[in-house]
Each structure stands twice: as C-alpha cells, then as structure tokens.
Image (cartoon, grey):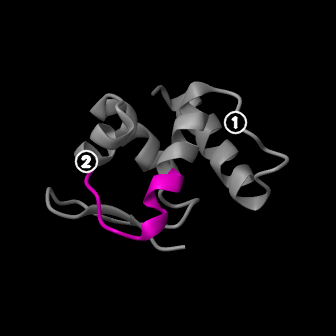
Amino acid sequence: MRKKEKDAFEKWAIAYRADPIVNLSTTPSQALAILIHDKMSDGKWRTATVIADEVKEPLSTVQNIMRSIKTAWGYEAVPSRTKGYRRIM
C-alpha cells in the first residue's frame, strides 16, 4: 500500500469507526477490513497469517490492513509469531 493510499485508508477507518452507516466501504480493501474486524470480534489473539488464512487473502494485504486499522479500531498488537493482534474495543 502506497503512503497516499495508506493515509486515505486510515482516514476512512477513523471515519468508519465514528459512524459506520455514513462511511460505508467503497473499495475491496475497506470491505476486507470490515470482514476482518467482524471476525476479530471474539477478542482472541490471531497472527496476520491466521487472519489471512481465515479470509483467504494474501498475507501482505492483511498485514497492510491490520497496520492501518489497529489504532483506529482498537486492536492490541504484539509483534510476535505466537500472538499477533486482538480486538479490545
């Protein structure tokens, strides 16, 4: 994801968090972010590899999305092969 795309994606993530009805997804990446967010609702730890397998998307795509949404959408991240990410909000 290029810097310009990443910045736009992060702005969308913040807006979506504030009002999901008004700020619906308009790109495949945004739709994937929403799908990942729904799957992470159980609060369990998952690595990016596990998430990629669950949503059947490339690891690099999932890693980019997780880096972009983790702060805006309330994720705890541990840079580890055993823990990864979990949704805390």
Residue at screen point 34% across, 68% down: 44
Magenta stretch: residue 5 in it? no
Q: Residue 15 appears at what percent x and percent y?
A: 74, 51
Q: Is residue 24 above or below residue 21?
A: above
Q: Residue 29 appears at what percent x and percent y?
A: 54, 31
Three-letter amino acid code of the residue under disc 2 = Val
Quick one: SS at disc 2? helix
Q: Badge 1 local density, few (<14 within 10 Å), some, or many (20+)?
A: some
Residue 67 or 34: which is nearer the viewer? 34
Using the rendered view, name the quadrant where residue 18 is placed: bottom right
Residue at screen point 64% across, 35% down: 8
Question: In which quadrant is the N terminus drawn?
Answer: top left
The dot on residue 46 is none
* Residue segment shown in magenta: 37-47
Residue at which label 1 appears: 25
Q: Is residue 36 above or below residue 1?
A: below
- CA separation, marks 2 and 1? 23 Å
Q: Which of marks 1 and 2 precedes in the sequence?
A: 1
Question: In which quadrant is the C terminus drawn?
Answer: bottom right
Q: Residue 4 appears at what percent x and percent y?
A: 58, 28
Quick one: SS at disc 1? loop
What residue occupies the far bottom of the structure in this picture? 88
Residue at which label 2 appears: 50
Q: Is residue 63 above or below residue 69?
A: above
Q: Is residue 35 left or right of residue 55?
A: right
Q: Is residue 86 left or right of residue 89?
A: left
